[in-house]
Image (tube, helix red, strand yellow):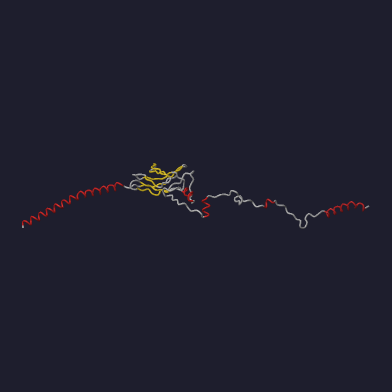
Amino acid sequence: MAPSRNVPLMAICLLLISGSICQPTTYQTGTLRSRSIPSEALELPSDDYYDETEDNPTTFPPETVSVNRGTLKRCDYNPCEEDQPPCAELRATNHCLCPGFTSHLEAPQAPFLKTVAWNGSDVILRWCAPYSFVKAYKVTVGGTERQRFGMDRRSGGLGPIENVSEVCVVSLNDAGDSEASCMMYQPRDHSLSLKAGLIGGALGLLLLLLLPVLLWRRRQRGKQQTAITMTDTIDT
């Protein structure tokens, strides 16, 4: 009776043993797999700033390209020279480079006042233009506007200035006025030179009037001496 009781137990053991033997091994030699990586992650990011196949590549200003390549020269533009065309016209006609100018939508920079001096008949001032879009120049004397000049002018006459005054020049365009560039003007004492000239002229005129009189008196003295000499000769 004892062997019959062990039959079910043995069957169960055989089933367990056979199941463990038939089960395939998960890790086989040469078949170890890693987690798959999406192919998108292996692609390099695209260049957002440069594309050799781009139909409309970014174009740079002519000045920048020309400077890097060394193909253009600076325009023959002098901000202190009068009656010359604007640098923009020189650039268009001569294909040259202009210095950086501010836009016509901005108030211009201040000009540079060089000299304020008396020039025989009136006060002349000279200035240099700023690197800005300018439509006119305004000149003030003692805070009061005296003259306006065109955009191509670099000098102008103000007439006489009798007292010590601050002379200023301002550049203008439609966007506004620039800051003022100023100098103090010290008038000369022109009355002294005028008096000296008048005195000199009067002395010259007086000499011209006295010269005939002196010559006449000299002749008279010569005649008298001749007459005396002849009298003495007759008496002897």
Q: Looking at this view, name the residue that lies furthest to the front.
A: 93
Q: Is residue 205 left or right of residue 132?
A: left
So how many labels did they put on this image? Answer: 0
- Residue 199 in percent (x, y) is at 25, 48
Q: Looking at this view, name the residue that lies furthest to the right.
A: 1
- Residue 208 in percent (x, y) is at 21, 49
Q: Is residue 143 left or right of residue 33?
A: left
- Residue 154 in percent (x, y) is at 41, 47
- Residue 53 in percent (x, y) is at 61, 51
Which is nearer the eye, 131 or 177? Answer: 131
Q: Is residue 50 left or right of residue 138?
A: right
Quick one: quadrant of the C terminus?
Answer: bottom left
* Quadrant hosting residue 28: bottom right
Q: Looking at this view, name the residue that lies furthest to the left.
A: 235
